[in-house]
Amino acid sequence: MHRPLVLAAASLAVIATGFGTLALASPRSAPVAAPVALAATPFKVDAVHSAVLYKVKHMNVSYSYGRFNDVSGTFLLDAEDPSASAIDVTIKTESVDSGNGDRDKHLRSQDFFSAKEFPTIGFKSSAVRKTASGAFEVDGTLSLRGQSKPITATVESTGTGPGMRGGEMAGMHTTFTIKRSDFGMSFMVGPIGDEVTMTVSLEGGR
């Protein structure tokens, strides 16, 4: 008289065992996304500890210096795989700072940067090669005052290390020269130099 109960219990045990097997097998069959390698993650520019400076000849007798105070973007310099390196930087034109308020207003005007019409200056790399000295030769496009021109700059990786609040930090430095007239900035070329030397020192974290 207990045979039906025994068979029912046995059936439940078999079913339970089957579900248990499926439960154990499920995690093995589910695809797992591969983690993104930290080495491929670009560094985000820390504007507080970065600098974008310029130098231009004034009246052919001395150099006038200035800076841009608002810089953002990302960079990655990979010594093992230079082709994976990339630099993408944006500067707010309004942040130009020559140390003189009246001159800064003039620099933001249509005579120079025309900051209202062209609020940003940008650089984006297109190719990176490592040189024999250990530096990087970077090809890219500089966009300034509505003009985009190809440039090549030698970039130095200035170091990497742990961040003060965790994570990792890195730095890069470059100096290159452009002609402002190439970007439609021809006001007073002569008394004010055409060649402008840019120095960019970036610190970033990830």
Image (cartoon, grey):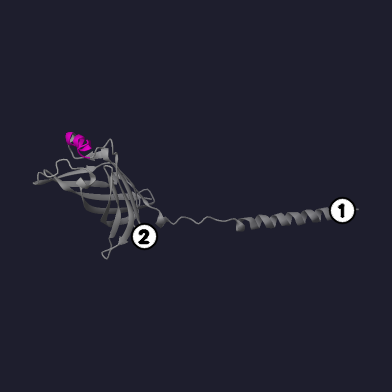
Which residue is outermost to the bottom?
132
| Residue closer to the observer: 31 or 178 | 178
| Residue closer to the observer: 191 or 68 | 191
Q: Horizontally, is 46 left or right of 56 in the view?
A: right
Q: Residue 164: horizontal and vertical position, in percent? A: 35, 49
Dot 1 crowding, Cα within 10 Å, few <14, some 14–19, many 20+ = few
Magenta-drawn segment? 102-112
Q: Earlier in the sequence, mark 2 or mark 1?
A: 1
**Circle 1 SS class:** helix
The quarter of the displayed image where residue 16 is located: bottom right
Answer whether residue 91 is magenta in the image.
no
Residue in the picture at 28% in, 36% down: 117
Residue that label 2 marks: 83
Q: Which secondary structure is most common in the magenta stretch?
A: helix
Q: Which mark is residue 34?
A: none
Q: Residue 160: horizontal and vertical position, in percent? A: 33, 56
Q: Amino acid at mark 2?
A: Ser
Q: Residue 68: horizontal and vertical position, in percent? A: 25, 42
**Circle 2 SS class:** helix
Q: Amino acid at mark 1?
A: Pro
Q: Which mark is residue 4?
A: 1
Dot 2 crowding, Cα within 10 Å, few <14, some 14–19, many 20+ = some
